């Protein structure tokens, strides 16, 4: 919706710019015609110059560059030549000044050559006019170089302002396209992170349970059967979660994630303690609430799942403590090596998501212990 509103706004800006330029060119052209035209022929010629100027600006702003600009340049040049040499009208420079400025801006690689060519045309026409009136050279020089230049300045100013505004609108359009591309890239990263959470967590659990089953295969076949059954159920659940993720229907259950982490740690021989200081958003007082469908519950569940995977992968933990408060979750484990902390890219990605929701994600390693704490702002309607 934001991109659609931006696009509508840009179209409105472009239309407004064209309307303002058209109105300005028409008003100035009408004023010059009323002040300088002495007969019907001069009116027709000067009107053609104004029409050429309007069409050139329309072609530049509407994307029909050369289909309108080149014919307009021919007409404006003819108006300038005929207006000066045949009608003695310095106002004929208005059309050529607007069209010439548009042409110069449309030819960035040949801008200097185009500008020099237009100047040469103007100088030649004025020189011819001056040579044709040797009895009044000073008057011709005063009327055409000075008068035509004054009129031309107006045309150059209007065409330049239109060019600047059009470029600004084009830059807005390019910025909108870049924003759309960034949004797609962010969504791909989010999808990849969620897929990593699902698949990575499952693979670590499967690895642990298969290792346990191998140890018990000759001693406790019933336990082996239960472990393999859990592996089968876990793989099936992962397939279902992957499908839900693909259809944007995935929902994490915080209470289920706590229970799953507890069972996983115990299966790995790690003592687990779960403290509930207050129900997290989406949970009941007993902690047995759904915890799904709420942004806070889902995000905290992702933090717990990623932290569980990191503990099993990077630590030799003997004890883990999980604390749930009204606004967040804290996980502390021992068995941390006194070396540089491992690269926890999953938590780094989650930190960005937590901060976007107005919360904080703290990761600390100290005295052989590792702390992961996520807090989210409590909504007013949840208090």
Image (cartoon, rainbow, N blue to C red):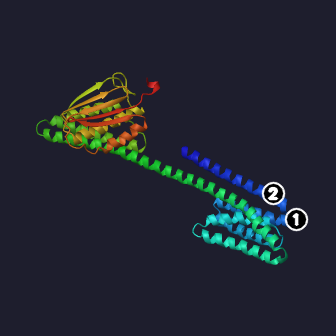
Residue 71 percent location from the top left of the image: 71, 68
Q: Can you see residue 252?
A: no
- Left or right: where does residue 177 sit relative to residue 310? right
Most extreme residue toward the top, as rendered?
285
Q: How many marks?
A: 2
Secondary structure under the numbered disc 1 in the rendered image: helix
- Left or right: where does residue 282 sit relative to residue 167? left
Residue 149 percent location from the top left of the image: 73, 65
Query: Quick one: label 2 or label 1, which is nearer the N terminus?
Result: 2
- Image vertical order of residue 150 relative to residue 247, above or below: below
Q: Residues within 10 Å of mark 1 (few under 14, many from 20)?
A: few
The answer for how far apart the CA atoms under marks 2 and 1 are is 15 Å
Residue bearing the label numbered 1: 40
Residue 151 percent location from the top left of the image: 75, 62
Residue sitting at 81 percent across and 57 percent down? 31
Q: Can you see residue 43?
A: yes
- Of tags 2 and 1, the one toward the viewer is 2
Residue 282 percent location from the top left of the image: 40, 28
In front here: 259 or 11?
A: 11
Residue bearing the label numbered 2: 31
- Left or right: where does residue 28 sit relative to residue 38? left
């Amino acid at each position: 919706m934001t991109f659609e509103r931006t696009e509508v706004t840009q179209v409105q800006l472009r239309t407004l710019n064209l309307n303002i330029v058209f109105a300005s060119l028409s008003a100035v052209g009408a004023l010059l015609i009323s002040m300088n035209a002495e007969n019907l022929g001069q009116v027709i010629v000067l009107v053609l110059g104004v029409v050429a100027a309007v069409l050139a600006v329309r072609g530049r702003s509407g994307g029909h560059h050369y289909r309108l600009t080149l014919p307009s340049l021919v007409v404006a040049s003819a108006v300038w030549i005929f207006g000066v040499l045949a009608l003695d009208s310095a106002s004929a420079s208005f059309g050529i000044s607007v069209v010439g400025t548009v042409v110069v801006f449309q030819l960035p690689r040949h801008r200097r050559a185009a500008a020099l060519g237009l100047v040469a045309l103007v100088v030649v026409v004025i020189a011819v006019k001056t040579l044709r009136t040797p009895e009044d050279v000073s008057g011709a020089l005063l009327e055409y170089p000075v008068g035509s230049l004054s009129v031309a300045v107006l045309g150059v100013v209007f065409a330049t302002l239109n060019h600047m505004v059009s470029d600004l609108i084009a830059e807005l359009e390019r910025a909108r396209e870049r924003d759309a591309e960034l949004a797609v890239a962010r969504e791909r990263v989010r999808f990849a992170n969620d897929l990593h959470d699902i698949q990575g967590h499952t693979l670590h659990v499967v690895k642990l349970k298969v290792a346990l089953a191998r140890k018990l295969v000759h001693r406790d076949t019933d336990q082996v059967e239960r472990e393999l059954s859990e592996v089968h159920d876990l793989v099936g659940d992962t397939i279902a979660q992957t499908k839900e993720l693909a259809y944007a229907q995935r929902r994490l259950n915080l209470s289920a994630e706590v229970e799953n982490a507890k069972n996983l740690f115990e299966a790995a021989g790690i003592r687990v303690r779960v403290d509930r200081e207050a129900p997290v958003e989406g949970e009941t007082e007993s902690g047995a609430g759904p915890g799904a469908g709420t942004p806070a519950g889902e995000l905290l569940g992702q933090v717990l799942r990623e932290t569980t995977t990191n503990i099993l992968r990077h630590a030799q933990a003997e004890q883990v403590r999980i604390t749930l408060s009204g606004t967040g979750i804290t996980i502390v484990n021992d068995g941390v090596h006194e070396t540089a902390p491992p690269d926890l890219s999953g938590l780094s990605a989650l930190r960005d998501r937590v901060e976007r929701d107005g919360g904080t994600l703290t990761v600390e390693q100290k005295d052989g212990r590792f702390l992961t704490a996520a807090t989210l702002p409590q909504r007013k309607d949840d208090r």
